[in-house]
Amino acid sequence: MKSGRPQLRSKDPVSGAPRERRVTEDTEAGPTPAEAAARVMPQSPAAPAAGFAPRPGPRGLGAPASGARRRKERVISAVLLAFSAVSILTTVGIVFALAREAFAFFREVSVFEFLTGTEWTPLFRPPQFGVLPLIAGSVLIAAGAAVVALPIGLAAAIYLSEYAHDRVRRIIKPILEVLAGVPTVVYGYFALTFVTPLLRSIWPEIEVFNAASAALVMGIMIIPMVSSLSEDALSAVPRALREGAYALGATRFEVAARTVVPAALSGIIASFILAISRAIGETMIVTIAAGLTPKLTLNPFESVETMTAYIASTAAGDVPHGTVEYQTIFAVALTLFAITLLMNIISNIVLAKYREVYE
């Protein structure tokens, strides 16, 4: 019985006898010469294959933009540039406003006397314009706040990043955010009416207005900043570093202390510097709890005056505009601005020098 497939007859190369070979369906209809040439010769990019039309690209990609579209993009770019320039122009305006009055002050008082004097009595006669007592009071309270906030904030960040379960983290983080949202005037009266009596019950010689209570409460205030920024730095450390340390037999504390914290050290130090800058610039807590006594001392149990407290109290007083006493506000404010700017620059240098980049 004959098959429906066509058969080709060929001769055996040895005996010369004819033999049959079945042709499959693929070889039954072989390619035409044109198709064979098309398979061998590559297609030109400018000439697509027959039956395959090029797919049109997305609108606006590769196609020449219309005039209306170009104008719209230019308007959007200009608006975004204006929004970006707001912060720069604001900073320039602040520096100009401070420098104009401060330079008028320094025409009456030498810069050397201002930076090296140990007495600050600009409203008394004879006036003394040594800013060191104000700087010392600001540094004393900021240092005390750092002693409280930095270890507690770092410990909270390590716990949230390495130890806490998701449910616990969802409870603790909102509590820290609540601390960050409490008004500073509330912190000030909390220091004056609760912390100060508590300290006086332990050390009766503490003055009513003192640097210790202001430093403690300010440290509590900046704990959320330290913990939040440090946790972000710890969470950015790749998981592979932790898994490698665990594979070597390290405990969870060893992984956190010897692997994760050193890898995130630049971000942690930057959070410390920013928190201290925030403490130096705080106003209401020190005005209410620390007092208004400009004193060059390192005793936290005494009353001191900070730069921000002097600015707030003097600006709210009856100092005549245009006088040297009035211009001291801007001279002190320019000094405070220079200190905080210097600390921010140091923070950026630390980030750039010790930053770890992981692929």
Image (cartoon, rainbow, N blue to C red):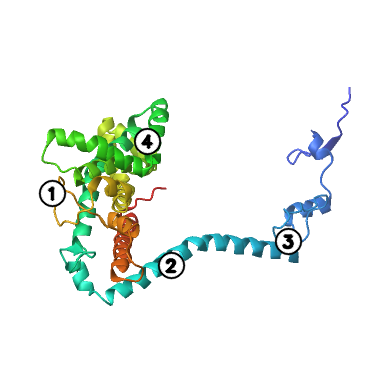
* Secondary structure state at the residue bearing disc 1: loop
Sequence-wise, the earlier of marks 1 and 3 is: 3
Of residues 306 and 35, which is closer to you in this image?
A: 306
Disc marking residue 299: 1
Residue type indicated by callout 3: Ala
Which corner quadrant holds the N terminus?
top right
Can you tell which of label 4 and label 1 is closer to the viewer?
1
Can you tell which of label 1 and label 3 is closer to the viewer?
1
Q: Residues within 10 Å of mark 2 (few under 14, many from 20)?
A: few
Of residues 95 and 330, which is closer to you in this image?
A: 330
For the residues labelled 3 and 4, the Cα–Cα distance comes to: 52 Å
Q: Residues within 10 Å of mark 1 (few under 14, many from 20)?
A: some
Can residue 292 be seen at all in this image of the molecule? Answer: yes
Name the residue carrying label 3.
63
Name the residue carrying label 2.
92
For the residues labelled 1 and 2, the Cα–Cα distance comes to: 38 Å
Sequence-wise, the earlier of marks 1 and 2 is: 2
For the residues labelled 2 and 3, the Cα–Cα distance comes to: 42 Å
Q: Position of residue 56 (x, y in %)?
A: 76, 53
Of residues 353 and 185, which is closer to you in this image?
A: 185
Disc marking residue 176: 4
Q: Is residue 263 left or right of residue 60?
A: left
* Secondary structure state at the residue bearing disc 3: loop
Q: Position of residue 24 (x, y in %)?
A: 79, 34
